């Protein structure tokens, strides 16, 4: 198992460094000037996410289990898809990330029971988001409902994560 982990580090760390450098070149527009390369701008970001997913799968397999039976693995898969699709269409990416957060909520509820503090933290999170974005709300138009839904999912996930520590 240590050999597999060492090999994984020897392969993934250089790849992550190269992806980081490629990402900088894409971000600064150096590679976007070449039409043949411009269509691949999402690859460094998605490849980094893929390394996270495959690293998690490898860790689970090294423990003699199937990654498919672990909710956090599916969360990573959905985040990987979200990374890809958010660059193509923001709503599609948001849906994948929202689904990932919903799975995290399910996972959190398997670790600990729902607590009254979760409701208080959730309400405070929604209130804080509305205060922070109050000037932007009129300009959101038809995106207001999806944005509020996404903020709700994020704050519920956050509230459950905070209360797990207290109740688990």
Image: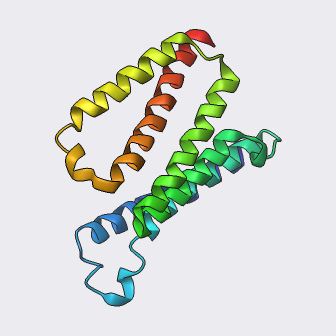
Q: In the depicted view, which residue is nearer to us: 167 or 64?
A: 167
Is 39 left, or right, of 110 in this rendering?
A: left
Relative vertical location of residue 85 with respect to residue 156 in this rendering, above or below: below
Is 61 left, or right, of 97 in this rendering?
A: right
Percent across and percent down for residue 34 are: 30, 87
Say which residue appears at 66% left-offset and 45% top-offset: 73
Residue extending furthest toward the left: 135
Q: Quadrant of the C terminus?
A: top right
Residue 111 in view of the camera: yes
Is 157 left, or right, of 57 in this rendering?
A: left
Q: How many marks?
A: 0
Which of the colour schemes (rainbow, by chain, secondary structure, one colour) is used? rainbow
Percent across and percent down for residue 92 are: 49, 61
Say which residue appears at 57% left-offset and 47% top-offset: 99
Relative vertical location of residue 25 with respect to residue 6 in this rendering, above or below: below
Say which residue appears at 57% left-offset and 13% top-offset: 115
Percent across and percent down for residue 50 are: 56, 58
Residue 131 quadrant: top left
Q: In the depicted view, which residue is nearer to us: 84 or 29?
A: 84
């Amino acid at each position: 198992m240590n050999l597999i982990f060492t090999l994984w580090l020897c392969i993934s760390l250089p790849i992550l460094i190269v992806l980081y450098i490629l990402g900088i070149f894409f971000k600064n527009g150096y590679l976007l000037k070449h039409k043949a390369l411009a269509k691949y701008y999402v690859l460094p970001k998605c490849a980094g996410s893929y390394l996270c997913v495959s690293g998690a799968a490898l860790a689970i397999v090294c423990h003699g289990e199937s990654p498919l039976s672990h909710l956090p693995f599916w969360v990573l898969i959905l985040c990987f898809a979200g990374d890809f699709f958010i660059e193509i269409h923001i709503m599609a990416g948001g849906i994948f990330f929202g689904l990932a957060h919903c799975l995290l909520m399910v996972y959190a509820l398997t670790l600990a029971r729902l607590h009254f503090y979760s409701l208080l933290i959730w309400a405070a999170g929604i209130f804080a988001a509305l205060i922070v974005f109050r000037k932007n709300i009129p300009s959101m138009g038809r995106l207001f409902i999806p944005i509020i839904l996404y903020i709700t999912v994020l704050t519920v996930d956050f509230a459950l994560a905070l209360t797990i520590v207290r109740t688990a």
